[in-house]
Image: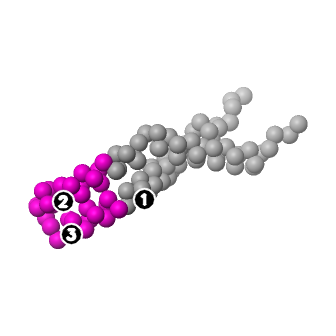
Amino acid sequence: MSQPRSSSRYLSAQDEDKIIKEWRKQTMKECDAFVKAFAECSQGRTVSIAWACRDQNKAMNDCLRTYRTQDRLDAIRQKLMDEKQTKLQVASPNEP
């Protein structure tokens, strides 16, 4: 008889999408000031953004690279898997 799929090992495409969205949300929250500074600088500009907002763009991208890491993504994924495992255990507790 095959083992049931464990939520700690398998995530649906919907779960993965949720993880990516949370990762992006957390990153944007951490870098909010840098994103706003770049947005303010770029307002009303077209081609001149490249040189006029170079410093703000670099600062924003440095922040995003700092927080948008594989380790953070893995931590969010692990948290979701732990939550799913807990729900699974509550839904079908082991009987002695």
Whether residue 9 is situated above or below residue 91 in the rendered picture: above
Q: Is residue 47 magenta?
A: yes
Which residue lies under the disc numbered 2?
53
The scheme the figure's colours follow is one colour
Question: Few, some or many C-alpha atoms within 10 Å of disc 2 (few <14, some 14-19, many ≥20)?
Answer: some
Of callouts 2 and 3, the N-terminal one? 3
Give me the C-alpha separation between circle 2 and circle 1: 21 Å
Which residue lies under the disc numbered 3?
43
Q: Is residue 86 magenta?
A: no
Which residue lies under the disc numbered 1?
29
Amino acid residing under circle 3: Gln
Tag 3 near tag 1, CB within 8 Å: no
Give me the C-alpha separation between circle 2 and circle 3: 10 Å
Position of 57 with respect to 46 (left or right) is right
| Residue occupying the point 77% across, 45% down | 92
Amino acid residing under circle 2: Cys
| Residue occupying the point 63% across, 44% down | 82
Res 1 quadrant in image: top right
Number of the label disc, if any, that sits on residue 62: none
Residue 64: percent from the left, percent from the top? 35, 50
Q: Which residues are magenta?
A: 33-62
Q: Does residue 24 appear in the picture of this structure?
A: no
Of callouts 2 and 1, the N-terminal one? 1
**What is the residue that sits farthest to the bottom in this orientation?**
44
| Residue occupying the point 67% across, 43% down | 85
Whether residue 11 is situated above or below residue 25 in the rendered picture: above
